[in-house]
Amino acid sequence: MSRPNAPLVPTAWATIGPFFPNTFFREGDNDLTRMAPDAPPTAQGAPMWLTGRVLQEGGGPCVNAVLEAWQADAAGRFRHPRDPDWQQADPGFHGWGRAWTDAEGRFAFRTIIPGAYRDATGPRAPHINLAIIGSGIMGRLATTIFLPAFAEANAADPVLASLPEALRPLLVAQPDGLAEDGAPRFSLDLLLRGDAATETPFFED
């Protein structure tokens, strides 16, 4: 006979996946300037690096998280049919890459400085889109990273302008010297959860 008011036996605690093996990644997957991981760089435009850390609440590293980056080419075009000018997009720029975080939560992408463009929302400043998935993250998180050299375009960007002014700097990467290949490096940490003044703004993907 059932006992509807009887205490329930707790289920075992487990961290939510997914978990990704090393074989999920290939060397060069994080280099958007190559059409394939083992191909030479062919993208037009000025090379750059985007680096940073993915952090959990409290500042601890988010280990083994996957980041996907996608962006326009140096002329502001996407190699996708939804872009009216996609046939004029740089044929040597893939526009997409994947990286994962190490034991300190660090990630790195090699890419080119993206161009500005206009879409249905208005004039878009040069930016790089990022998506994050990983252990303990309930869904795919998406955000947009801007560059400090385009302050005027950033101020007019409708996505950045949709945020309270105090939060906009959280999406602007900062100069961080030069990489080993001589390309400028820009860095930005992504805080998955925190207080209203420090948590990275995420958008609907």
Image (spheres, rainbow, N blue to C red):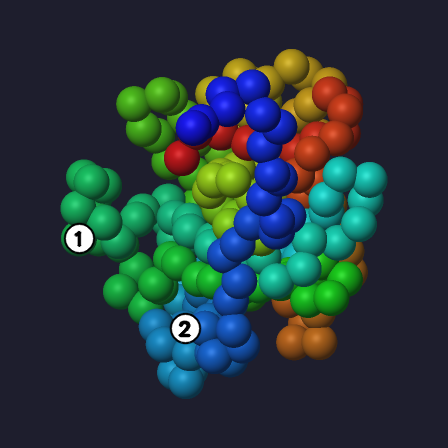
Query: Residue 84 occupies which quadrant of the picture?
Result: top left
Can residue 188 be seen? no
> Horizontal and vertical percent for residue 155?
58, 22
Indicate the quadrant containing the C terminus: top left, top right, bottom left or bottom right: top left
Residue 32 relative to residue 147: left or right: left
Residue at point 72% right, 44% down? 56
Residue at point 38% right, 57% down? 95
Whichever of callouts 2 and 1 sits on the residue coming sooner in the sequence is 2
> Horizontal and vertical percent for residue 26?
47, 78
Give me the C-alpha separation between circle 2 and circle 1: 19 Å
Q: Amino acid at mark 2?
A: Arg
Q: Nearer the viewer, residue 66 or 114?
A: 66
Q: Nearer the viewer, residue 1 or 37?
A: 1
Residue at point 43% right, 39% down? 116
Residue at point 23% right, 49% down? 80
Query: Residue 99 occupies which quadrant of the picture?
Result: bottom right
> Horizontal and vertical percent for residue 16?
56, 49
Q: Classify mark 1: helix, strand or loop.
A: helix
> Horizontal and vertical percent for residue 123?
41, 26
Residue 57 relative to residue 109: left or right: right
Q: Decide: is 145 above or below 178.
A: above
Numbered badge on residue 42: none
Badge 2: few (under 14), some or many (20 or more) residues near its Cα, within 10 Å? many
Q: Nearer the viewer, mark 2 or mark 1?
A: 2
According to the image, label 1 marks what residue?
Answer: 87
- Residue furthest front in the image: 1
Q: Classify mark 2: helix, strand or loop.
A: loop
Can residue 88 be seen? yes
Q: Decide: is 113 above or below 47.
A: above
According to the image, label 2 marks what residue?
Answer: 34
Indicate the quadrant containing the N terminus: top left, top right, bottom left or bottom right: top left
